[in-house]
Image: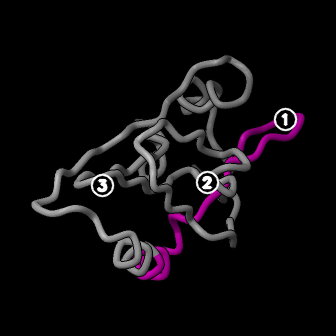
Amino acid sequence: MTNGEITQGDLMYTYGGFGAGIDYTVRLCVRMKDPVDGGVLDEALLDTSKRYPYLSLRMRKDANRLFYEENRERVVLFHTDKKITLNAPESNYHVWAVCYSDDVIMLDFYHGIADGTG
């Protein structure tokens, strides 16, 4: 990735979210000892977003390219165990989101968020 652009080599990993109907979302789940406190998790999510601002991205497409751009919207916390659609209105167009239910925290993210190649 150069200047936020997604290279041709990354195309097969990113195209799915833009019309191919393929979902490249990864979900990591962590089971906690006690039920998750949504308020505490929300504070942790805000702190994490501030600490890693370079992960606050949105994937865009124009006539010639796919690219990342800064996303100033809040990373979303969901009190659900249902699958989240990333880079869509429900996730504020972020390429990651956090969910929780009972004693489980789920991190949903586009697999190329950090390396662009999966």
Q: Is label 3 in a helix, a strand or a loop?
A: strand
Label tally: 3
Q: Is residue 10 left or right of residue 33?
A: right
Q: Which residues are magenta?
A: 46-66
The numbered mark, 1 or 3, whose residue comes first in the sequence reads 1
Q: Is residue 76 left or right of residue 65?
A: left
Q: Are marks 1 and 3 in contact (CB under 8 Å)?
A: no
Above or below 3: residue 115 = above
Provide residue 5's location: percent of width, then percent of height.
67, 49
Pointer 1: what residue?
64
Pointer 3: what residue?
105
Residue at 10% x, 60% y is: 33
Going by the numbered disc 2, the residue's amino acid type is: Thr
Tell which tag, 2 or 3, sits nearer the viewer.
Answer: 3
Q: Is residue 93 covered in magenta? A: no
Residue at 59% x, 32% y is: 14
Provide residue 99's location: percent of width, then percent of height.
42, 53
Q: Is label 2 in a helix, a strand or a loop?
A: loop
- Mark 1 → mark 3, Cα distance in angstroms: 38 Å
**Badge 3: how crowded within 10 Å, few (<14), some, or many (20+)?**
many
Q: Which quarter of the picture shows residue 18?
A: top right
Pointer 2: what residue?
2
Provide residue 112's location: percent of width, then percent of height.
47, 42
- Toward the right, the furthest residue is 63
Going by the numbered disc 3, the residue's amino acid type is: Ile
- Mark 2 → mark 3, Cα distance in angstroms: 33 Å
